[in-house]
Amino acid sequence: MKYIVALDQGTTSSRAVVFDASARVVAQQNIEFRQIYPNPGWVEHDPRDILDSQLGALRQAVEKAGIAPADIAAIGITNQRETTLLWERSTGRPLCNAIVWQCRRTAPLVERLKQDGLGNLLRDRTGLVPDAYFSGTKLQWMLDSIPGARERAARGELCFGTVDSFLTWNLTANHVHVTDATNAARTMLYNIHEQRWDPDLLRAMDIPERVLPQVVDSAQVVGMLDRSVLGREIPIAALAGDQHAALFGQGCFEPGMVKNTYGTGCFVLMNTGDAPVRSARNLITTIAWRIDGKPRYALEGSVFVGGAVIQWLRDELKLIACAAESESVALEAPDNGGVYFVPAFTGLGAPHWDMYSRGTLIGLTRGANRAHIVRAALEAIAYQSADVIAAMESDAGTRTQLLRVDGGASANGFLMQFQSDILDVRVLRPTVTETTALGAAMLAGRAVGFWTDADLARLQAVDREFTPAMNAAERAALLRRWHRAVERSKGWALED
Ligand code: ADP
């Protein structure tokens, strides 16, 4: 047995990655699938598309790698989180399209929960901020709108699952109905302290317990890949939400370790150890992973507009031809020339939380040019991430020593150096930036004894380390002006 395969089921594409024993990528395959927008603010996936694209990616990756299925020790699954599916237990037939995490249709149901005074209870038990983003009200909506569904669910005839659960059901011959603790922690139904579905929350959303999957560890064999897929049974040995898998794949095993993924948005997660930390700054408390029955907890904060601001410069302002060009253009300016850009296109998330904040370009003088604006956009990605990390440090009472980075925009050397400067911490970029897939592979490898804990700690090869080179006075001045710009962006959409 020489390989581990990770299935990374994302929002726009399904990916399969074959890793060897040194965690090097042997082959990978990505297959995009259809996004369905039935109404403004609604987002759906066809469950068939999710499954077919994932199976296609798996088969093609194994073929590309030129390996025998008999050489695959295990499969790990990581997935877009919160996306909600409902299917029939006897046939596996989905009752409707998957409701995708981005879908806002259940905002009124969340408002009702808040009006019923359940906001604090929800926060205490699930660690989440009540929002339509999470699975609970999506399932409630399905049970409300499909005739007879709630009664059938109560009789045990239906299965709810997030994408990990749906894939496991369909990839295993015996149709195992499970989810792992990290995915359960995103449902708004799971008590992260007691590690069980919460009866009070189930009652509040009118969800019968029999529809829910059994919650398992993130690293454990949950079933065997059906022989029909690759001609051989292979253990499915890990399930974890994408950001949790990335935290594991970055080797953030100890309390205080932090990773930031610079994609369309930025996702910062900090390992907080055995105890959940309740945030005083509206960060999310979540389960990092559960291994050997023991949960590890994490704080999570996200930046809505990260790499997306670079896409905006490219597609709307046409200031750059491609995302990578942002680096050389930014470096044409010796400094930001006093220009600050708050990319609050959809409001601001943690720790500012202002949904009426809007994009603000400020500090312009006659001397401001393209390089200043591009630079201000890249700096904004780093400032926003720094604000989230500062909130985490103050919630957790720790000081970050090292930031591990991945995601598309982590390729930008200027951005990474500026991130290191503005945080005054070292920034470590690994060779394998497919850390989500790597994390799922590592969890699966651990579950089947392919890797020991000591092996796991050695699997992250460093591509480049960035060390802070900015003096304290300059850092403080930049942050002060950034925060003044943030203040000026707030409430804009209210003032009509
Ligand atoms: P996602 O998984 O959210 O689709 P990716 O991890 O693939 O995101 O990263 C894509 C994002 O990274 C895009 O928003 C893009 O603008 C940004 N990006 C990619 N390369 C660079 C670069 N060299 N500099 C700055 N931003 C970049």
Image (spheres, rainbow, N blue to C red):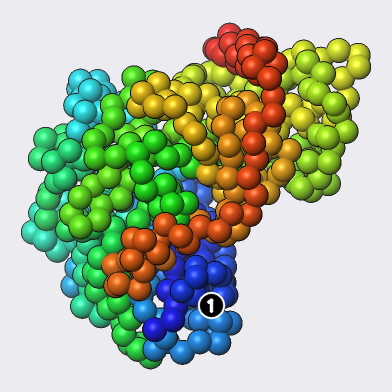
- The residue lying toward the viewer, choosing from 491 and 362, is 362
Q: Viewed as shown, does residue 411 lie left or right of 243?
A: right
Q: Name the residue under label 1.
A: 61
Give the residue drawn at x 48%, y 24%: 390
Give the residue drawn at x 55%, y 87%: 66
Q: Quadrant of the rendered structure where residue 200 is?
A: top left
The three-letter amino acid code for the residue at tag 1 is Ala
Q: Quadrant of the rendered structure where residue 173 is?
A: bottom left
- In the rendered image, residue 162, in percent from the top left (x then y), is placed at 32, 55
Q: Quadrant of the N terminus?
A: bottom left
Q: Quadrant of the rendered structure where residue 444 is?
A: bottom left
- In the rendered image, residue 448, in percent from the top left (x then y), is placed at 29, 72
Q: Viewed as shown, does residue 250 lie left or right of 398?
A: right
Tell me the SS state at disc 1. helix
Q: Viewed as shown, does residue 408 lie left or right of 63?
A: right
Give the residue drawn at x 40%, y 21%: 394
- In the rendered image, residue 93, in percent from the top left (x then y), is placed at 29, 69
Mark 1 Cα shell of 10 Å, populated few (<14), some (14-19), many (≥20): many
Q: Quadrant of the C terminus?
A: top right
Instruction: State whether residue 49 appears in this view.
Output: no
Give the residue drawn at x 50%, y 87%: 67
Instruction: State whether residue 271 appears in this view.
Output: yes
- The residue lying toward the viewer, choosing from 425 and 168, is 425
- In the rendered image, residue 330, in percent from the top left (x then y), is placed at 81, 34
| Residue projecting furthest to the right | 367
